[in-house]
Image (cartoon, rainbow, N blue to C red):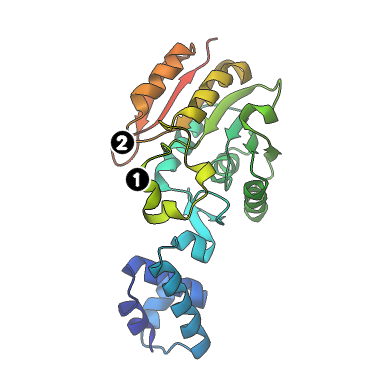
Amino acid sequence: MIIAQALQSSGVAPIDARVLLRATLAVDDAYLIAHAGDALGEAHEARYHALLARRAAGEPVAYIIGEREFYAHGFKVTPAVLIPRPETELLVELALQRDARQVLDLGTGSGCVAISIALARAAARVVAVDQSAAALAVARANAARLDARNVEFLGGNWFDAVPARRFDLIVSNPPYVAAGDPHLAQGDLRFEPPSALTAGADGLDDIRTIVAGAGAHLCAGGWLLFEHGYDQAPRCRELLTRAGFAAVQSWRDLAGIERVSGGCAPS
């Protein structure tokens, strides 16, 4: 079988086939184009078909190849962490618009948000918290491979990991899917850790905890920014307003969906 045939007869989405073949051969897209007529060796063909079978069974490509690009960086991912998604890049962009030297990332998972901020702001000191030891191991590995030296990783449940500490900026991509949401039984979500996805009957339990506790850990004028579900922005703004935050607002992602909400701590 030649490379062109391997892509055409994959049985999965063309973009997935290309990613899996790149991973099999450890090459880039330019190589696949330039060598479309080259034959695959037996070992490569067997490995490629094994990867295709996993994808055909529904396993996310990111878990199959062990990596996902986020904010122009390659992040290691395992089933212990949520797969980084493009819409979460909005959270990083909003964070970088604020002059924050002390940053807290709650529920860091793969570390993609904390590390992206740290790499873009060398003078900042970022603290990344997660209650999962397995997730923290992935995040630490990502920081090491990307040489993000200004990130501190702590284990703990939300603010329990940073008692009495204050920050200029708190960011989070917390679980926000309702426990009974039918989407949990579809697509990539079937393979991702439930603890990184669901948060109570309405999906807002963890956001309530974060909003309620953020004031005690923000410097005067500091910001809280967090991602949420496509239909949760009005309720998130209400939670922020009730908690005493100023300049409460929501921001839309590239699909036009209100994806991140936040507010400023009173000065």
Indicate the quadrant containing the N terminus: top left, top right, bottom left or bottom right: bottom left
Q: Earlier in the sequence, mark 1 or mark 2?
A: 1
For disc 2, the marked residue is 257
**Place of residue 190 in the rendered image (x, y in percent of width and height, measured from the top left):** 43, 54
The Cα–Cα distance between marks 1 and 2, rounded to whole angstroms, is 20 Å
Front label number (1 vs 2): 1
Question: Judging from the image, what secondary structure is the residue with disc 1 in?
Answer: helix
User: Which mark identifies residue 182?
Assistant: 1
* Residue 264 seen anywhere in this rendered image of the structure: yes
Indicate the quadrant containing the C terminus: top left, top right, bottom left or bottom right: top right
Report the amino acid beneath label 1: Pro
Report the amino acid beneath label 2: Ile
- Please give left or right for residue 31 compared with residue 15 in the image: right
Relative to the observer, which residue lies in front, 260 or 161? 161
Q: Measuring 37% from the left and 55% from the top, which residue is drawn there?
A: 187
Question: Judging from the image, what secondary structure is the residue with disc 2 in?
Answer: loop
Relative to the observer, which residue lies in front, 219 or 58? 58
Q: Measuring 43% from the left and 33% from the top, which residue is drawn there?
A: 203
Q: Measuring 43% from the left and 14% from the top, which residue is drawn there?
A: 241
